Amino acid sequence: QIPISTVSESLSVLQQGTLNRTTAATLMNQCSSRSHAVFTIWLQRTTITARSSKTNLSESPPLDVTTSSRLTFVDLAGSERMKKTGAEGERMREGIKINEGLLALGNV
């Protein structure tokens, strides 16, 4: 987890993650993604609100209300057809693993 406070910080972290992804050329795509990626953002916002009008505001401190949200972005490597990609050796083994991962996700 990397704490961030601004949109530019979040984009910088996203770019860092993108640079860590594995890509390779196949017959179908010059820059084929060879891995899945998950980018999760946890947002937290705290607001200070006055107490209910039914209470005496001078006697009650303000009430902190915290709202939490989670956004998850997933980029899955595409399925592979060995004949179309022309994959051999290490690229073929990666394609098999990609397909196994996608099949497992389909069974969830």
Image: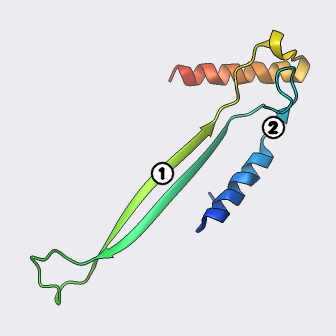
Residue 18: numbered disc? none
Query: Residue 98 appears in which quarter of the rendering?
Result: top right
Q: Nearer the viewer, residue 17 or 7?
A: 7
Q: Does dot 1 land on a helix, a strand or a loop?
A: strand
Q: Residues within 10 Å of mark 1 (few under 14, many from 20)?
A: few
Q: Is residue 3 visible?
A: no
The location of residue 100, given as percent across then percent down, is 67, 20
Image height of 20 relative to 34, above or below: below
Residue for point 89% across, 16% down: 88
Residue at position x 75%, y 54% from top? Answer: 16
Quadrant of the snapshot with the N terminus: bottom right
- Disc 2, SS: loop
Q: Percent from the top left, x then y, of residue 92? A: 84, 18
- In this rendering, the answer to whether 33 lies above or below 102 is below
Distance from Cα at disc 2 to Cα at disc 1: 26 Å
Residue 81 pos. (x, y %): 76, 13
Image location (x, y in percent) of residue 101? 65, 24
The residue shown at (13%, 77%) is 53
Residue type at mark 1 is Arg
Badge 2 amino acid: Thr
Q: Mark 1 highlights which residue? A: 70
Q: How many marks?
A: 2
Name the residue carrying label 2.
Answer: 22
Of pointers 2 and 1, the one earlier in the residue sequence: 2
Image check: 107 left or right of 13?
Answer: left
